[in-house]
Image (cartoon, rainbow, N blue to C red):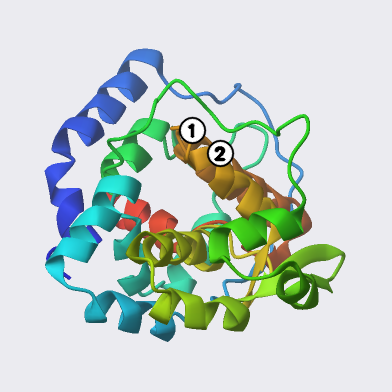
Amino acid sequence: MEESITQITEKNAVVREWSLKTRRERGDSLVEGCVANLPEQITVNVCQNNLEDLVRVWNQWDSDTRGIFTERYGDIAHLITIRVDEQLIQAMVRFWDPAYQCFTFNQEDMTPTIEEYVALLRIDNVQFGKICVKEPKPMTFRKKLVRLTDMTDAWAEKQIKKKNETVCIPWSSLRESVLSHPDILKRINLFALAIYGLVIFPRVLGHLEVAVFDFFERLKQGVNPVPTILAETFRSLSTCRRVGKGRFIGCAQLLNVWILSHF
């Protein structure tokens, strides 16, 4: 890739300075004398999807195709090259305070912000004040799958699976379309969908869940994806911290980069 996301963090000095200035002005969010009743021992699973297929696709694309992708979806493609430090994530979860939605170190607290994640992903073509909400009358999963892939209803119906009460589709069912769909824009869109399903919202390993398709459809309307990414990160951190175990299903790659940019 032309530029790694870890190199991009060096360009975010303005955002980091803003974050530090805000914390200094407003202080921390801890209430004096508050005692959190949380497990002392934390065991978090940070198991990730195998992203070799996505890396191979990206490396095969020419600069023009990559440029079109970046113009549409920002720098989310850089996430597929990030190697997650599982021990780092596991250690950081121990400092997460679910009540205040922040990492707490003695009397100091810090948390990822929308501004920081936007800067890391360099998403420019969205309406930052517009967030994703559930459509009142959404299309069925099958119809969305057909529209995105140009495949038949019968094919789509056959691919839909249910894993642990989650409706989803195996990544293997989309791999060929990402590699060889005759429409370059379809390939780009499916590649972005795969990143959102396998990297940013990896709830079911090896699969893309129906919620990702719903979310992806809303991106076409210019919504800002970062609040949803952050919300899932906070939810997963809080669940793991309260229970003392579980699998972190937020975007570990982006959280990993954010942690390294502050330490």
* Depth check, front residue: 156 or 235: 156
**For this view, does 87 lie left or right of residue 188?**
right
What residue is at 49 percent from the left and 41 percent from the top?
Answer: 219
Q: Secondary structure at mark 2?
A: helix
Q: Is residue 250 visible?
A: yes
Tell me the element at label 1: loop
Residue 36 vs residue 75: left or right? right
> Which one is in front, 148 or 122?
148
Q: Nearer the viewer, residue 40 or 91?
A: 91
Say which residue label 2 marks.
218
* Residue appearing at x 33%, y 79% in the figure: 57
Q: Please state the horizontal and vertical placement of residue 71, each as a whole percent of the image.
A: 25, 47
Residue located 66% across and 54% down the image:
144
Q: Indicate whether 116 appears above or below 156.
A: above
Q: How far apart in space, not on screen, are marks 2 and 1 (Cα)? A: 5 Å
In the image, which disc is placed on residue 221? 1
Q: Amino acid at mark 2?
A: Arg
Q: Nearer the viewer, residue 146 or 3?
A: 146
**Residue 103 seen from this side:** no
Q: Quadrant of the N terminus?
A: bottom left
Residue 3 percent coordinates (x, y) = 14, 63
Q: Is residue 30 above or below residue 67?
A: above
Indicate the position of residue 22 as horizontal and vertical percent values.
Answer: 32, 20
Density class for disc 1 (Cα within 10 Å; few <14, some 14-19, many ≥20) is few
Q: Relative to 182, is 70 on the left or the right? A: left
Callout 2 touching callout 1 (CB < 8 Å): yes
As drawn, 95 above or below 42: above
Give the residue at the far top of this rendering.
25
Residue in view at x 41 percent, y 34 percent: 113
**Callout 2: few (<14), some (14-19), or many (20+) C-alpha neighbours within 10 Å?**
some
Rendered location of residue 83, percent (x, y): 36, 75
